[in-house]
Amino acid sequence: MNSYKDLIIWQKGIDLVVLTYKLTDYFPKTEIYGLASQMRRAAVSVPSNISEGWSRKNTTEYINFLSITNGSLSELETQLVLSEKLSFGDRNSRNHCFDILSEIQKMVVASINTLRKSL
C-alpha cells in the first residue's frame, strides 16, 4: 500500500465522520457545543489516528495509534447511546453510525492482533 488512504479501515473511518456530522446536524441547537461537538471530535479522531499511526512506519507505534482509535470508537459509541436515550437525531442515521462503528471496531481489533503477531 502506498498510502493510508488505501486502507479500508481509514476509508470507513471517513464514512463514519460524514455520517456523524449528518446525524448531529439534526441535534437541538443547544447541543452544538455539547454532545454534537464531542461526537464530531471523537469521530474525526478515528481516521486521524489511523492515518497518523500508519504514517509513522513503525509497527509498535501503529498498534498504539490503533488502540487510541479504539478508545475514540468507544467514546463515540457511548455518545451515540446518549443521543439515542435523549432522542437526538434520526434513528436510521444513528443506527447506520452504530453499524459502521461496529465494523471499524472489529477491523481495529483484528489489525492490532495481526500486527502484534508480526512483532
Image (tube, rainbow, N blue to C red):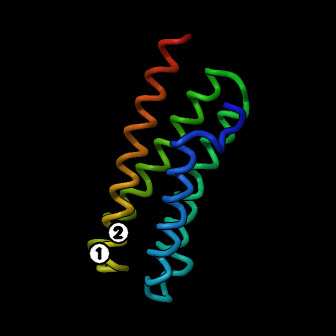
Above or below, 59 against 76 in this view is above
Question: CB under 8 Å between callouts 2 and 1?
Answer: yes
Q: Residue at x 49, y 87 (%)?
A: 30
Mark 1: secondary structure: helix
Closer to the camera in the image, 70 or 47: 47
Closer to the camera in the image, 36 or 108: 108
Relative to 3, is 110 on the left or the right?
left
Relative to 113, is 53 on the left or the right?
right
Residue of label 1: 91
Q: Mark 1: give few (<14), some (14-19) or many (20+) Cα within 10 Å.
A: few
Q: Residue furthest left?
A: 85
Residue 94 tag number: 2
- What kind of residue is marked 2? Arg
Relative to 52, is 34 on the left or the right?
left
Position of residue 56 measured from the top left corner of the image (x, y, whole percent): 73, 30
Q: Quadrant of the C terminus?
A: top right
Closer to the camera in the image, 10 or 81: 10
Position of residue 117 measured from the top left corner of the image (x, y, whole percent): 47, 12
Task: Name the image quarter holding residue 113.
Answer: top left
